[in-house]
Image: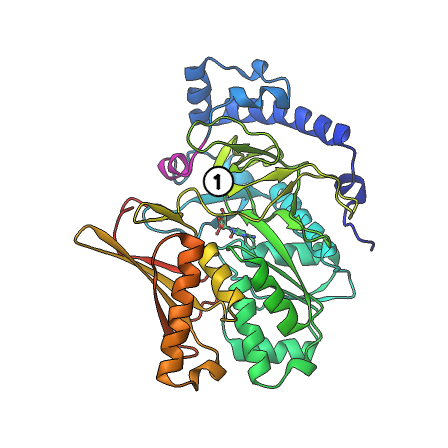
Amino acid sequence: MGRYYQPEIECASQEQIRAWQDERLIKQVRHVYDNVKMYRERMDELGVTPDDIKGREDLHKLPFITKDDLREQYPYGLLAKPLSECVRIQSTSGTTGRRVVAFYTQHDIDLWDECCARAIVAAGGSNEDVVHVSYGYGLFTGGPGLNGGSHKVGSLTLPMSSGNTERQIQFMTDLGSTILCCTPSYAAYLAESIIERGLRDKIKLKAGIFGAEAWTEEMRHDIEEKLGIKAYDIYGLTEISGPGVSFECEAQTGMHINEDHFIAEVINPVTGEVLPDGEKGELVFTSITKEAFPLLRYRTRDICILSHEKCPCGRTHVKMTKPLGRSDDMLIVKGVNVFPSQIETVLLNKGYPANYQIIVTRANNSDHLEVQVEMTPEMFSDSVSVITEKEKELVSALKAMLGIYADVKLVAPKAIARSEGKAVRVIDKRNLYQNN
Ligand code: DLL
């Protein structure tokens, strides 16, 4: 198998992609209008009929859908196929309140698996590989998605799921895993654990496919160096299918969105205005091939930038940057917008591991930001005065990056609880968003 899983699709001309999108969008709008009450009501309210949608250029006529809509329609409200034709549900990791449940027909699963197969082949995967899947299996889409993709590619698939690090490492060394799929924070933890056990020479990993949470370029370099691999980003969300909505190629300069299945738009999150390539805004997806749970103009809350620049890998599908933050989990501390990724960049630049927690509290109407950072074992042996000096150094680096004061506490190696799935980076004790 070559560098592409489906070269005729992944390298199709812009005109061909556009033609697929036009044709599939028209069909999809008719499908949801006929089968989902909420879409019919929303479109009727706007005075838009399926006949008004003649292609992508008419996308802007359709209403946006938000996570709140999904919660309100829980569980069956947005189902567009009879339950008898659905074979699977998956669900978001969820915060509080109602979860979001997504449904799949067998055809939906096949297409989703193909998207993940494209990502695995882009990371150098083939039927010669041993794909070690340490994303959680179950309601979370990470495990099932990469598992399905690996089967399509014909790789030997290790359905490890998350947790039990000892067993992960044993299988990895015994079975010669070559591609690791997990969250970047778990990859960093596995790397640390492998090095600690002196097993770095016993692993055969060549690539990693890491996503489901924000991670920085610095973290990528750290993992690549520690494991001796090339680390590829993968993006997706349960509502739209799961991992594989977009994936990185060897150029590592953004993720190709599988445009034959998903139409991407970037909008101004406040006005809803559609923004051109190169402008930062909220990512919105329309799923044009999903049968059971199709979403039109779904607002992801992920902030990113789209680019149609030619990619050296030969793929023609539009690229998105890593999510640069979320329009909702952006912290506002003392009135200043703070993204956890900014803090992570400072820490990694200064040689700290990506094991940290951001704690925000409020007393007497004043916000307080504290960053707890783990020391490396070498730093831990330093004297108290050296540690205090290091804390001061971080305080001023964070001030320069964020524009506000953050208290820094250096803690012992391993003091911050490790995550086997998505890392818990932020503890906001202010209860400002009680409905979320
Ligand atoms: O996280 C699906 C997934 C699994 C993606 C495995 C990649 C690998 P949800 O639990 O529904 O689905 O969370 C979706 O996670 O809106 C983003 O905010 C965030 N996210 C996903 N991938 C990335 C990434 C899965 N590569 C939400 N970088 C999305 C940054 C990501 N954030």
Is residue 134 part of the magenta span, yes or no? no
Is residue 68 part of the magenta span, yes or no? yes
Q: Does the residue labelled 1 lie within 8 Å of ligand 1?
A: yes
Q: Is mark 1 on a helix, strand or loop?
A: strand
Residue 339 is left or right of residue 230, and the answer is: left
Residue 331 at x, y percent in the picture: 37, 49
Residue 348 at x, y percent in the picture: 52, 66
Relative to 293, say whether 252 is above or below. below
Residue 426 is left or right of residue 254, and the answer is: left
Instruction: Determine which quarter of the picture holds residue 1.
Output: bottom right
Residue at the image position 29 percent from the left and 44 percent from the top: 435
Relative to 197, say whether 74 is above or below. above
Residue 63 visible to the viewer: yes
Residue 245 is left or right of residue 229, and the answer is: left
Instruction: Determine which quarter of the picture holds residue 343.
Output: bottom left
Q: Which amino acid does label 1 sit on?
A: Thr
Residue 259 at x, y percent in the picture: 66, 37
Residue 80 visible to the viewer: no
The residue pinned by badge 1 equals: 300
Q: Which of 416 and 93 is in front in this view?
A: 416
Coloring basis for residues: rainbow
Residue at the image position 64 percent from the left and 37 percent from the top: 261
Judged by its main secondary structure, the magenta piece is helix
**From which residue to which does the magenta span run?**
65-72
Q: Which of 412 and 98 is in front in this view?
A: 412
Q: Residues within 10 Å of mark 1 (few under 14, many from 20)?
A: many
Relative to 340, say whether 330 is above or below. above
Q: Which of 217 and 237 is in front in this view?
A: 217
Residue 149 at x, y percent in the picture: 67, 54
